[in-house]
Amino acid sequence: MYIDTHSHLYEEEFREDREEVIQRAKEAGITHIILPDIDSESRGRMLDVAATHPGIMFPLAGLHPTSVHENYPEELAQLEKTLGSQSYYGIGECGIDLYWDKSYYREQVKVFEHQLGIARDCHLPIVIHSRDSLEIILEILRKHPQAYGILHCFPGNAEEARQAIDHGFLLGIGGVVTFKKSQMADVLKEIGPRNIVLETDSPYLAPTPFRGKRNESSYIPLIAEKVAEITQTDTKKIAEITTQNALNLFNLHNKNTDKNSALNQADK
């Protein structure tokens, strides 16, 4: 039994074969897939996929940092409106991205802190995107002690990992951990697997041996196997730890109608 805590399965890359991708995920033992939000343009597609697959797809609500532009007040207004009319399991993905464009840095910080406030008020976990910005993210989180959730695609070193864990965050571990030059192996050796969850970020960041191709949730076991190898832990134990962490974080207990069939497939 596995949970993919970060998949953009609603994106156009899956338009032609989405049902086949979902079926492969089930056959691989994936019982829940968390769908992070991007912005108002993609939110409808995300909600359509979640509504079509209840019991396995669980949407979040958020504004991605690369979608923060001049119209961010309108985007935040739409975000707050949808929170009042639709059930969500967390806030995100949100955060700060200084890799692609730094021109809206101040706006990104403002929007991120606003969403931290939403997560607090709604008593929901938050999924954080940090690219070339982890130090800034950790500094902001120190001002928001109530925040908890996932640092998606965790990019930091062992000391930064400890800071995140001490704050109450889990580390999102995906396909990058299987790359030869990934520093995540060193980080996991030091911190162990107790405070992590598994994710694909599909269609991006496919693990070895699919690096460079479209990623999908059925590859989660490959990530688990690599984490098990690095931490010298049984793969089934990694599945157990990461699944329980995700179930607890997103309050997903008893919210999967396909659990039994997926578990039966996983045991084959």
Image (cartoon, rainbow, N blue to C red):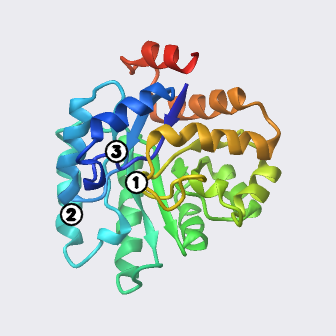
Q: Amino acid at mark 3?
A: Leu
Q: Mark 2 or mark 1, which is nearer the start of the sequence?
A: 2
User: Mark 2 and mark 3 in contact (Cβ < 8 Å)?
Assistant: no
Q: Mark 1 or mark 3, which is nearer the start of the sequence?
A: 3
What residue did someone put label 2 on? 75
| Pair 1/2: label in front | 1
Badge 1 density bin: few <14, some 14–19, many ≥20, Cα 10 Å: some
| Pair 3/1: label in front | 1
Q: Position of residue 76 (x, y in %)?
A: 24, 61
Marks 3 and 1 sit apart, C-alpha to C-alpha, by 17 Å
Identity of the residue drawn at 55% across and 61% down: 141
Q: Mark 2 or mark 3, which is nearer the start of the sequence?
A: 3
**Residue 82 appears in the rendering:** yes
Q: Amino acid at mark 2?
A: Glu
What residue did someone put label 1 on? 203
Compare residues 165 and 117 and report the one nearer the observer: 165
Position of 52 compared to 239: left or right?
left
Instruction: Please determine whether, in this image, residue 217 is positioned above or below residue 210.
Output: above
Q: Position of residue 114 (x, y in %)?
A: 35, 62
The C terminus appears in which quarter of the rendering? top right
Identity of the residue drawn at 48% across and 57% down: 128
**Residue 87 appears in the rendering:** no
What residue did someone put label 3 on? 60
Compare residues 164 and 208 and report the one nearer the observer: 208
Instruction: Please determine whether, in this image, residue 147 is positioned above or below residue 156.
Output: above
**SS assignment at label 1:** loop
| Pair 3/2: label in front | 3
Position of 193 compared to 209: left or right?
right
**SS assignment at label 2:** helix
**Residue 86: mark:** none
